[in-house]
Amino acid sequence: MDTVNGKRVLIADDEDGVRYLLASYMKDMGYNDIDSVCCGRAVKCLAGIDYDLVVLDISMPGCTGREAAHLLKSFNDRVKVLLITGHAYKDSEFGFPVLPKPFNSEELQAAIEVL
């Protein structure tokens, strides 16, 4: 895997436990610049910071991961976006890769590597 040090990551999920777990997985993968927020703050972060990777929950109060992903791409078309969800969706429904919950660190890493 390519070095990930210096890559900026945003994790957006409305569940504290999921954000904490994702941040832990990302640190174990070697990411060291991680922002973890709920959806309301995610959109503000997207407009102000140039992220390399964004992991967004599809279903969050205030905005959806899909809406946030499309907004993000309008700011930075090079950013890698991974949507996560506890519901049954297909990648083709959103135009972005979707990783179903629950997942482990290996599944997350594999999903990121193919972005």
Image (tube, helix red, strand yellow):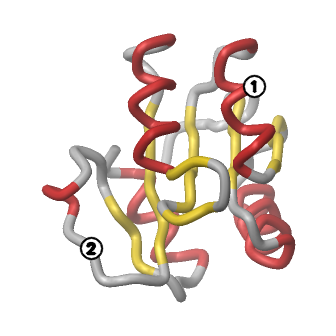
Classify 10 Å Cα crowding around label 2: few (below 14), some (14-19), many (20 and above): some
Label 1 secondary element: helix
Label 2 secondary element: loop
Classify 10 Å Cα crowding around label 1: few (below 14), some (14-19), many (20 and above): few
Amino acid at pointer 1: Lys
Q: Position of residue 87 (x, y in %)?
A: 40, 82
User: Taking 41 as reference, is 61 left or right?
Assistant: left
Q: Position of residue 101 (x, y in %)?
A: 50, 83
Q: Position of residue 91 (x, y in %)?
A: 21, 60
Q: Is residue 63 above or below residue 109?
A: above
- Given residues 9 and 44, the one toward you in this image is 44
User: Taking 12 as reference, is 17 left or right?
Assistant: right
For label 2, the residue is: 89
Q: Which mark is residue 44?
A: 1
- Given residues 10 and 26, the one toward you in this image is 10
Determine which quarter of the picture holds residue 47.
top right
Q: Is residue 23 above or below residue 18?
A: above
- Given residues 2 and 99, the one toward you in this image is 99
Q: Is residue 76 above or below residue 25?
A: above
Determine which quarter of the picture holds residue 45.
top right
Residue drawn at point x = 44 percent, y = 56 percent: 83
- Given residues 99 and 72, the one toward you in this image is 72
CB-based contact (under 8 Å), mark 2 and mark 1: no
Label 2 vs label 1: CA separation? 26 Å
Determine which quarter of the picture holds residue 13.
bottom right
